[in-house]
Structure formats: C-alpha cells, structure tokens
Amino acid sequence: MRNDDLSENIKQIFSGLIQGTRSRDESVLWANSVLEKDKMSNLSSAFVDALEAIGMAALKGGPEEDYLFDEDDFRKWMEEFLSKECED
C-alpha cells in the first residue's frame, strides 16, 4: 500500500472511530493486517504508531467492562498522527 493511501485510510478510520460510524473490531483487524503485511517495508514511526493505536481501539478492561479508550483518545491519536506525519 502506498503511503498516501495508507495515510488516507488511517485518517478515515480515526474519523470513523471518533464519530462512532466505524466498527472498533473491524478497525483493529484492518490495522493488524496492515502491520503484518508491511512489517518489513520500513513504515515510518508515524504510521506504525497510528496503526498500533488503532489496534488498541477494541480493548476492554474485562469481558463485562467498558472499552479502555474512547472518542477523546481516538481524537488525540489522530492529532498525534497528523503531527508526526508532517515531521516525517
């Protein structure tokens, strides 16, 4: 996947998570599959950090507990990604 495409996909996923229109589980699966496929392609830290953050979107404290991360976390992660992306 080209960096431009990956960047756009990451932004769309963060936006969907923030708005609640994107499945957490599907987002995690997507992020993990990208990391697995591209682990040897020397992705920049901005991409790796964003994908790892998305990979935590569905974590819960336990089976009957709430998610550990919410829309504020997703917003923060997106801002961090955008900031790091500009640095790279």
Image (cartoon, grey):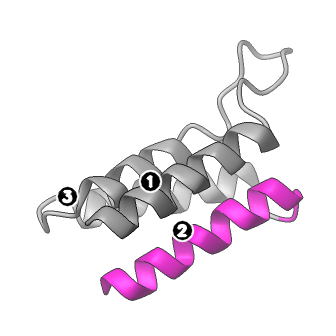
- Rendering quarter of residue 7: bottom left
Q: Say which residue appears at 20% left-offset and 58% top-offset.
A: 39
Rendered-image quadrant of the N terminus = bottom left
Quadrant of the frame with the C terminus: bottom left
Give the extent of the magenta segment: 1-21
Residue 29 - label? none
Mark closer to the observer (3, 2): 2
Any magenta on residue 20?
A: yes
Q: Left of 17 or right of it: where is 21?
A: right
Q: Answer above or below: position of 5 versus 54.
A: below
Badge 1 amino acid: Leu
Q: Secondary structure at mark 2?
A: helix
**Mark count:** 3
The front one of 85 and 64 is 85
Q: Residue at x 14, y 68 (%)?
A: 41
Q: Secondary structure at mark 1?
A: helix
Dot 3 corresponds to which residue? 39
State yes or no: discs 2 and 1 in contact (Cβ < 8 Å).
yes
